[in-house]
Image (cartoon, grey):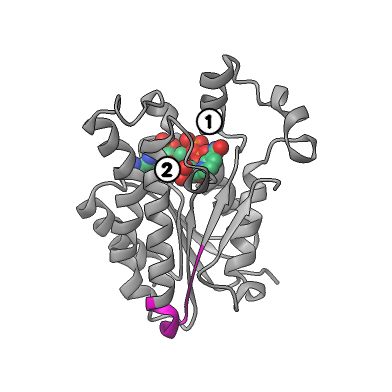
Amino acid sequence: MGKLDGRSALVTGGSRGIGRAIVLRCAQEGADVAINYASNEDAAREVSEEVAKLGRKAEIYQADVSDQATCEQMCEKAIDDFSGIDILVNNAGIGSSAVNRPTISESTIAQWQLLLGANLWGPIHMCRALVPHMREAERSDVIMISSVAAQSMGARMGTYSVGKAGMEALAHTLAQEERSNGMRVNIVAPGLVDTDMGRKLISLLTGNDDMRLRDADAPFGFVCTPDDIAASVVHLCSEDGRYITNQRITVSGG
Ligand code: NAP
């Protein structure tokens, strides 16, 4: 018996990295999964085939989460395809490296719009579109994949940290508004994780994207894997997490 038997999850940015690991963990634990991606259809299709091999239903949905109308169309289609969604994982995101880590004074409005579009407006659009439907389930879960950056507020991370801090405010507010509807809302905040985004960041900082060179300096002797993040997500959404809401779980090795 899986920890998520009978559940249906929508994971934004499920085609690669942390989102991919969350999709596969959810499916391993018995959930059907709606997989959102931005542009990498081959990767999304590969993940959906892995889900099918696990005996679970998967559908893929191309949608830029920064676009309200596109999010609404995707959510309507997913609700229809899966006869309801009761887990939303707001995972899709863009790192500060994508805009070359500008300082606040160097940053352009276009850079802010790109990062806040995916990292803050995305979760807002997804919650507005899905939460009213998710109330129909006896239990539902919203997970926000934030970052330690929302607390450390490091230099040259502003375009990213501001969005993640906003996403966390969204989670804390939603948790209180929807508790009486059976909805649990929690934040999972990773440190550095071995993904395309993580490699791009260390490449910019050190000139080398080989994550294995970072292992010796990482807590416990290895850089966090996407599956370490997915494990926390499944725990929160499972029966084991039924009394946990409005919390921030930092998965960074301390
Ligand atoms: P990644 O390897 O770069 O993968 C990003 C995923 O998000 C891909 O599936 C991508 O789709 C999707 N995506 C990007 N922009 C999108 C948009 N506008 N609309 C829809 N989908 C979009 O990133 P990751 O490292 O797995 O990061 C996942 C989440 O964890 C992000 O929110 C990130 O901020 C957070 N995080 C990561 C780290 C880290 O070190 N990696 C640390 C802390 C927090 P395509 O495949 O179609 O491009």
The answer to the question of whether label 2 and label 1 lie on touching residues, with beta carbons closer than 8 A, is: no
Mark 2 lies on residue: 161
Q: CA distance from mark 2 to mark 1?
A: 19 Å
**Quadrant of the rendered image containing residue 99:** top left
Spot occupied by residue 58 in the image (x, y as percentages of width and height): 48, 56
User: Does label 2 or label 1 sit earlier along the sequence?
Assistant: 2
Beta carbon of the mark 1 residue lies under 8 A of ligand 1: yes
Query: 69 and 46: which one is in front?
Result: 69
- Residue at 42% x, 76% y is 176
Task: Please state which amino acid type lies under the numbered disc 1.
Answer: Asp
Magenta region:
177-186
- Residue at 28% x, 65% y is 128
**Quadrant of the rendered image containing residue 90:** bottom left
Mark 1 lies on residue: 196
Q: Secondary structure at mark 1?
A: helix
Q: Decide: few, some or many residues near mark 1? Use Cα within 10 Å; few <14, some 14-19, many ≥20.
A: few
Relative to 91, does residue 10 appear above or below in the rendering? Answer: below
Is 202 on the left or on the right of 80, as rendered? right
Spot occupied by residue 9 in the image (x, y as percentages of width and height): 48, 63
